[in-house]
Amino acid sequence: MTTSPARALPTLARRAFSTTAAVAKGSGGKPTPNKDHHIVQYNDDDFPRGFGVAATHCGIKKNGALDLGVLVSVSERPTAAAACTTRNAFKAAPVTVTTELLASTDGRARGFVVNSGCANAVTGSQGLDNAWAMSKSLTNALAPQPETWGKEKAGSLVMSTGVIGQQLPIEKITSAVPKLAGNLGLDSKSWMDLARAFMTTDTFPKLRCRSFNLAGQTIRMVGIDKGAGMIAPNMGPAVPHATLLGVIATDAAIAPSALQSALNYAVDRSFNSITVDGDMSTNDTILALANGMGTPGNSEIHEGMVAEYELFRNELTSFAQDLAKLVVHDGEGATKFVTVHVHGAPSYDVAKTVASSVANSNLVKTAMYGEDANWGRILCAVGYSSVPEGTIDPHKVSVSMIPAKDDPVQTPMVLLKDGEPDANLEANEDRATNLIQSENVTIDIDLGQGKGEAATYWTCDLSHDYVTINGDVSFVPPFADQKLTPQYRT
Amino acid sequence: MTTSPARALPTLARRAFSTTAAVAKGSGGKPTPNKDHHIVQYNDDDFPRGFGVAATHCGIKKNGALDLGVLVSVSERPTAAAACTTRNAFKAAPVTVTTELLASTDGRARGFVVNSGCANAVTGSQGLDNAWAMSKSLTNALAPQPETWGKEKAGSLVMSTGVIGQQLPIEKITSAVPKLAGNLGLDSKSWMDLARAFMTTDTFPKLRCRSFNLAGQTIRMVGIDKGAGMIAPNMGPAVPHATLLGVIATDAAIAPSALQSALNYAVDRSFNSITVDGDMSTNDTILALANGMGTPGNSEIHEGMVAEYELFRNELTSFAQDLAKLVVHDGEGATKFVTVHVHGAPSYDVAKTVASSVANSNLVKTAMYGEDANWGRILCAVGYSSVPEGTIDPHKVSVSMIPAKDDPVQTPMVLLKDGEPDANLEANEDRATNLIQSENVTIDIDLGQGKGEAATYWTCDLSHDYVTINGDVSFVPPFADQKLTPQYRT
């Protein structure tokens, strides 16, 4: 990582305690651990059939890192596309373009262009023009759409991430995209390069593959995502905005409406169930692309094919959860991965609201950082969750800690039983300390209303390094040793 | 402040990086400034007539600091009482008792007992018994209720703050209360002692007086509150829970229902419009007491007396705002006081929701700490505020910074105009830096929907010290050099 020279302070602003100087001394506390063990290397054969990818450094990131990538479906079958995008009222230009493209083509796309280093957000009409130019630069560089795709012309989706309020260097992008489109790769290295082109404050590229059997044939999926801060997505179908970006490409054959429906379900239970800092970005976008190359003989799955659809949807959900968890592992300053599981709730929405409340609590998150099994704070966050009054019966709530998989003792430890501290709590303090010191902490909350519904949220701790990363104007994220005036930093 | 000896870690739990050890090195960053300049000394004559107060150290705080206090109305007129208490589903025992007492006496009370060091929260039926015993220990120690109060017997309200999940040392309290009731003072020192008996992690006692003219007579008010963390109150009438505690006592004559109604209005625009960390406590309680001693000839104000009622309500609101701001000034680790003013909104609720979203954003709060005029984060928090979709028109939103009162230049600085960065933004970077380096920062957000409705939220920055105070198990708040197992810390 590079650091910028300290900004000259105007005379009026000089003070005995310059934050810039003071914070630069070090954030104190526990250092954020290296996260490279989350990188997985795959074989060329692990990736879905029929997607070509390429990435380059086109000049947005000043440090020479990859900042532009494309994915193109090279399938003879029309490729289904779906998107979930941010519900933030300030939606970035690429979100608008992607949404309009999907609406105008009934959910078909040739592929996408992604850039990092500049979010193309809050950029007015020029920003919109640039996002369209980015899209067309890929579509125009491709061979004509195969006749098998039908008459309707599919376009190229776009995603951007990086700083807000700056215009894209659009010529750099539009001149680089045709070269990328002429040099598509299907190998593992090309995919990893594409994952790197997504990165901003991420400390490792996020790429996963999975395969499963669907109606007797092997289906492959690849997923890429990025994000470390400004993470509290709440994405709906086709509503655009950009800090969490992701794509899942599969060679399954599935109709666009079924793909969108499955993606909505999956995103709700994965990307919309993670938080780093509770701040929902303006550019959050998850794309899904399905090109049918893995099941050449099969017709597209639709929602009426209940068994196949549900199998696909559940695999997609579980895969999206794997990808979403990578973002939490790479949360800014995170030293712990915390799972909040709520069950015994009257509805899924109640379970999710309670889990979100606990996962977003600064007091719970600092307690996790401090390795403090503080059930008072957990309880407090359960109690103030924004569910209708009377939904939670304090006398029925139980809270336990679940040991990590590698813990030699697998018995859960009860902190609170039916609304009161467990009788053995003080005697078990060493065990609580032991559990809380794990890198993976699981909090189990039973609302006690029968079997009920369940929901899970994934979060990280709130550390000194989070404050440094977001509060120190001399800290420059890896992508930008360019001069950034403070108000342009996301 | 005292610090506890490091807790012995169980063998299994020993690791190369013990958080306890690492964090204890120092939190890094900018030190939290001393807040003693917020203490105001008053004359005996500034306090409302007819309230006697006393405080002592009864043995809850192990360091000998004041931890128990009483207030008694010595008026011949019946004293009106009202309360706003937490909406957290886990309500502490004293909240339940205070609520029940007010309901059973139609809003009359003799006074209250308050203790700090133990919140009497999550303490089951024994906790309830103790809260009742605390209440009765005061009522029973007082001379019989004057006949002028009517037949219905008024009781004593109760408030507790401190650690969760521990039982009160009730004998210490019930034996000390009668002595306090026999030694009531009406002087400035007695009031300041009472304010000190409220304190937990507070760094200074919070006491204010004010007087105003009502129907030709001088009315006096005194206010005490406490709170530094776990601050994001959302209190409604008569719904009990305990980290923000406060009381406003006045010698005005006002009917209980009008007092409750005025208090609801005031609390919504003061204590319910502040945040330190977004965590709503289980014990938050604000009491109001009015004993009529300042206007001996006047009958009680009721809501039908529109001019008098609104004058009283508006004074109460402005006074409650002064008190609420003291809590933000003393926010855990706070180095800045930030005002978020939203106007041009279609309704008060929308204005308040948007202001709350910005005031609670960790990214905005760390930007304030870093003295970074980051309009991108402000905009982002406006955009994800939980108002109905379509309420905010991104193209109409403007964001400015308002200079502090002592700034030689009083012109606001526009960051964003009608949804786009202001044209002069880059040229004015020095001015932005200058404004953000003030201890008092005001963010003005115009939603651009005509004159519209307005709301204000008050918040502080998120600093390294906040993480240390809440994330370092070796940090012990000033009130407790007693051994606290980690799970009992609030």
Image: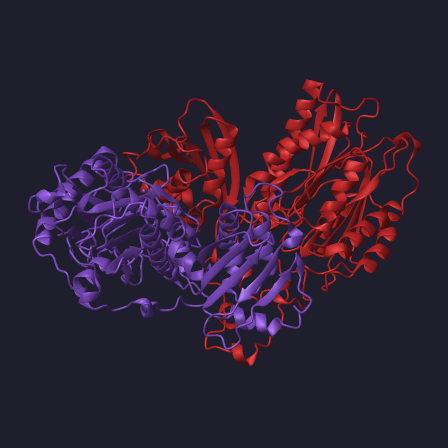
Chain colours: A red, B purple
> Percent from the top left, x then y, of residue A423?
27, 34
Q: Is residue B387 left or right of residue B205?
A: right
Position of residue B398 relative to residue A291, above or below, is below
Instruction: In this rendered view, identify the residue nearer to me: B293 or B352.
Output: B293
> Percent from the top left, x then y, of residue A70?
80, 47
The residue at 23%/48% (across/down) is: B300
> Percent from the top left, x then y, of residue B69?
18, 53
Image quarter of residue B197: bottom left
Image quarter of residue A321: top right
Position of residue B306 relative to residue A458, above or below, is below
Quadrant into which the C terminus of chain A falls = bottom right
> Percent from the top left, x then y, of residue A473?
57, 66
Count of residue discs: 0
Q: Is residue A42 left or right of residue B462?
A: right
Residue extending furthest bottom?
A11
Instruction: In this rendered view, identify the residue nearer to me: B105 or B3.
Output: B105
Image quarter of residue B19: bottom left
Quadrant into which the N terminus of chain A falls = bottom right
Residue A389 visible here: yes
Residue A230 visible here: no
Instruction: In this rendered view, identify the residue nearer to me: A85 or B451.
Output: B451
Q: Is residue A487 left or right of residue B28?
A: right
Instruction: In this rendered view, identify the residue nearer to me: A399 or B252.
Output: B252
